[in-house]
């Protein structure tokens, strides 16, 4: 019989954030309450910024230097030692394979040495579980079935989920996928367009803040697939349209004065497309709630528009858990641990990492 209370050490190294976290979970009436005791994250953003994107080799080398200090800090900040941990959760897919392998090897070594169970976690299941971290008492009981929108730098996925996370089984995200991007992810579109406007990588949050000073109606960029009945997305045309448009404005010497209006126009085109498909799927399937997760869920315009336009209750993760972090991996691990799905000493050593789902 599993104890109703557990402490999960989470590890995330799938891309350019090296993060460790301790999350305490407590079972109350069949639901888990997840409380974050600590999160220690080293962001490699500045290391990759000069290259305009993540350089895989730099990422894995830096994870190698940073992982153990992050684990030590997470344990110290939670005021516990490894022997107080119930299990270790680690992202093992999808992501940059070299970066993932650093986290997986570190987690395996720690779990083996401390004789702890190991929980391999799909990065997107981590984003999904981020919805339920540090919820105030009594909240988070959203009605089901629910639409889960995962909108990040690598994915734009719509999932229909019939049950709360305590019941999510193996492969839940693959079996519930209803729509995804046919080309660039929404976060990738933010980043590529931000680069065209001269903002550093990753540019989503720069567009978010610049757009507050602009008028979106002055640059109406395309909304592809608007007339197609599909739950898929397409964002690659936006980058081309923005590129041609900014070139013209630069030639006319009007680029600088139009930058905020351009940012607002880009943001509105992305948010419009996301909301159009989300609302279509909610109506078609009679869904009862929406959970929006991933880096783009931090966008202030999408939060503002959902608050006023969404026909069903919306749940967002706390802002600090939208972009990559190990607390969300520990959260997904807590659900898995509670279901008794941990790898034991015998089975953990063969665990690998995968760049794909
Ligand atoms: O989930 P995440 O941290 O990493 C992936 O798993 O991809 O998402 C990162 C993405 C980046 O594309 C970043 O530009 C975007 O999230 N992002 C934002 C905002 N904050 C982060 N996009 C729009 N508005 C924001 N405020
Ligand atoms: Zn992510």
Image (cartoon, helix red, strand yellow):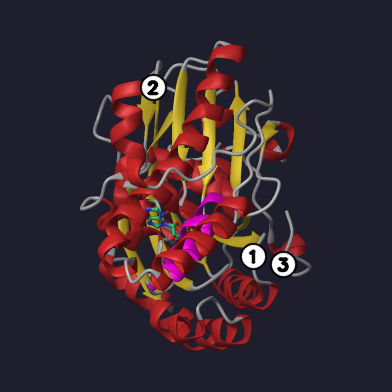
Q: Point out residue 24 in the picture as x, y percentages from the top left corner.
A: 37, 49
Of the residues under marks 3 and 1, which one precedes in the sequence?
Answer: 1
| Residue 213, above or below 165 | below
Callout 3–callout 2 Cβ contact below 8 Å: no
Identify the disc placed on residue 95.
1
- Give the image location of residue 297, x and y in percent: 40, 45
Splitting the image into four quadrants, where does ligand 1 fall?
A: bottom left
* In the image, residue 133 lies in the stretch drawn in magenta: no
Asked which secondary structure carries label 1, the reply is loop
Question: Which corner quadrant of the image does residue 113 belong to?
Answer: bottom right
Give whichever of discs 1 and 2 has the lower sequence position.
Answer: 1
The residue that appears at 56% across and 20% down in the rendered structure is: 280
Quadrant where the N terminus sits is top right
Outermost residue, top side: 286
Element on which disc 2 rests: loop
Q: Which marked residue is nearer to the observer: mark 1 or mark 2?
A: 2
The residue labelled by disc 3 is 353
Residues under numbered marks 3 and 1 in contact, where contact means CB atoms less than 8 Å apart: yes
- State the residue in front, 219 or 211: 219
Reading the chain from its start, which is encountered first: label 3 or label 2? 2
Residue visible at 46% across and 73% down in the picture: 18
Q: Secondary structure at mark 3?
A: loop
Q: CA distance from mark 3 to mark 1?
A: 9 Å
The one nearer the camera, 278 or 167, is 278
Q: Which residue is mark 2?
A: 310
Q: Which residues are magenta?
A: 185-198
Q: Marks 3 and 2, how far apart in space?
A: 38 Å
């Amino acid at each position: 019989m599993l104890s109703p209370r557990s402490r999960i050490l989470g590890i995330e190294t799938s891309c350019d954030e090296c993060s460790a976290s301790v999350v305490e979970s407590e079972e109350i009436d069949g639901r888990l309450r997840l409380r974050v005791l600590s999160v220690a994250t080293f962001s490699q953003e500045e290391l990759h910024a000069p290259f305009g994107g993540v350089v895989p080799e730099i990422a894995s080398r830096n994870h190698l230097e940073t992982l153990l200090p992050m684990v030590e800090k997470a344990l110290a900040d939670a005021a516990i030692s490894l022997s107080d941990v119930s299990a270790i959760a680690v992202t093992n897919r999808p992501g940059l394979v070299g970066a993932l392998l650093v986290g997986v090897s570190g987690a395996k070594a720690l779990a083996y040495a401390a004789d702890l169970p190991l929980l391999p976690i799909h990065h997107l299941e981590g984003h999904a579980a981020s919805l339920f971290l540090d919820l105030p008492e009594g909240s988070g009981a959203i009605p089901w079935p629910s639409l889960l929108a995962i909108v990040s730098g690598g994915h734009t996925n719509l999932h229909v989920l019939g049950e709360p996370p305590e019941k999510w089984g193996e492969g839940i995200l693959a079996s519930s996928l209803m729509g995804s991007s046919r080309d660039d992810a929404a976060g990738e579109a933010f980043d590529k367009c931000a680069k065209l406007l001269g903002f550093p990588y990753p540019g989503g949050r720069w567009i978010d803040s610049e757009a507050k000073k602009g008028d979106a109606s002055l640059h109406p960029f395309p909304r592809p697939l608007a007339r197609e009945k599909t739950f898929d997305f397409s964002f690659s045309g936006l980058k081309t349209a923005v590129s041609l448009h900014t070139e013209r404005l630069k030639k006319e010497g009007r680029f600088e004065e139009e930058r905020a209006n351009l940012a607002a126009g880009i943001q509105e085109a992305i948010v419009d497309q996301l909301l159009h498909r989300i609302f279509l799927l909610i109506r078609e399937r009679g869904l009862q709630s929406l959970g929006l997760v991933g880096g783009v869920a931090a966008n202030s315009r999408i939060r503002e528009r959902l608050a006023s336009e969404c026909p069903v209750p919306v749940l967002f993760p706390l802002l600090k858990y939208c972009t990559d972090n190990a607390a969300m991996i520990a959260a997904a691990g807590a659900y898995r641990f509670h279901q008794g799905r941990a790898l034991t000493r015998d089975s953990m050593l063969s665990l690998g990492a995968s760049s794909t789902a």
